[in-house]
Amino acid sequence: MERAEVAEMMGSRFGIPPEAFEAVSFFLRGRNVWAFSLPEVPDLDYEAVGLRFISLRGRVPKPSTYALQLFGRFATKNVVDLSSDQARKFIAGERQSMEADLEDGYVVVAHQGDVLGCGLYSRGELISQLPKERRIGEGGIENLLEGGGR
Amino acid sequence: MDGLSRYAGVIPEFDRFVEAIYRPLPTTARINGLKTGRDRLLTRLRGAQVPCSPFPWYPWGIRMGTDKPGNLLENLMGHIHIQEEISMVSAVVLDPRPGERVLDLCAAPGSKTTQIAMMMENRGLLVANDPANGRVASLRSNCERAGAINVAVTRYDGRRFPAQKFDRVLVDGPCTGQGMARKDPAVLGRWSLKRSLGLQRLQVALLKRGVEVAKPGGTVVYSTCTFAPEENEAVVSRVMERTSGVSLQEVAVPDLESSPGLAEWGGSSFGDEMKRCARYYPHQNDTGGFFVAKLVKE
């Protein structure tokens, strides 16, 4: 998998500059793109190499939560910064109505400028794409409210 | 006190040690520099009314005034990793650099792995090995959350890790875990000399393999979270006897109190050079207990 292809996917959707991926190599395994620090791996029997980055299973490429948590900070479009109430719903894995300047499709979801993960924006609704094992239900988050712990 | 009274003659201020070992541990975490800046994270936590203060000896470690750090948003985002303070010392002594080839031979659940990945700035190669199937899941999950892209996970029996050459190797071996008593008091009841001696065989084989796969001039760090000399100095001493061209370097971390390794124990003499290892006791820095040795290959 060429770096330029991945940079093009992340650039056209999120406006992330290609330089962000300069030190990263990408390879295809199944229908997932993985990111790794080196162009080649030494000859060992691996359980996993690098970070799962983009899924090519669907109609459009879907970035992983971890890819966006790492590179989403460089995004210049299709980014939404949530209020604390909205963030709480997002990390609980919920969908919520939202008027936002976003194209339909996958978006970078942030809170106070820090990336929470990937959302799907469709017909005025933001649907959390956070993996089930990472979700934290209502009341679980202690420190979401600005200036007030829960 | 199970298994601890045997240390009365070697642990300084033994009364304070005993008193400390029954106190719960402070809540601590490591800031993940791969995903956030130190000041940014501290500002965020303080803004959310979570009291936090950096360790005096390590700028990436913080103590936090919260009971459930796992539920913090910063944990979900991978900006912090919940990790016991003293366990951060292994990677600090290993001192990995960006672009190197590094092996973490007993890696799961990945606290030290993700710390090493951060110190390497996500560059070079970090092989994280652990044979246990169940533990590899937590290792992979922690690497994902940390955003580590330079980690390759393997599942070899560490004693027979394939021939490769690494700049640095961490052997954070399985141990009786007496130093974890403040987190789980039951470890003290489970200790026996027989268990220590049984683990010693495995620890010697792991460290020996760690030394073998290090490049000439490479660094090998051996660490455990137990006080038993059978699993610490005795292991290092045995491996050094059997391997030529390996020397011990002084382990000294500024602003972190420690005691020297033991030159002798239970009638066995390990030699004065073993004093270059470091023992960390709970009453010294209000942490868990730990042992670290730094070996350098010629």
Image (cartoon, rainbow, N blue to C red):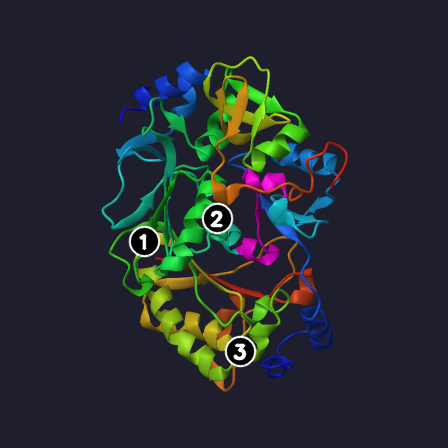
Task: Please check whether the numbered discs 1 and 2 fall on a single chain.
Answer: yes
User: Relative to residue B159, is residue B2 depicted above or below?
Assistant: below
Q: Determine the image quadrant of residue B51.
A: top right
Q: Earlier in the sequence, mark 3 or mark 1?
A: 3
Residue B148 image point, x, y percent: 44, 40
Which residue is at the far left? Answer: A43
Q: Residue at x 44, y 42 (%)?
A: B144
Q: Nearer the viewer, mark 1 or mark 2?
A: 2
| Label 2 chain ID | B
Question: 10 Å neighbourhood of mark 1: few (<14), some, or many (≥20)?
Answer: some
For residue B190, which numbered disc appears in the image? 3
Residue B25 image point, x, y percent: 67, 61
Q: Residue at x 51, y 24 (%)?
A: A108
For residue B232, which numbered disc appears in the image? none
Q: Earlier in the sequence, mark 2 or mark 3?
A: 2
User: Relative to residue B195, is residue B59 depicted above or below?
Assistant: above
For residue B216, which numbered disc appears in the image? 1
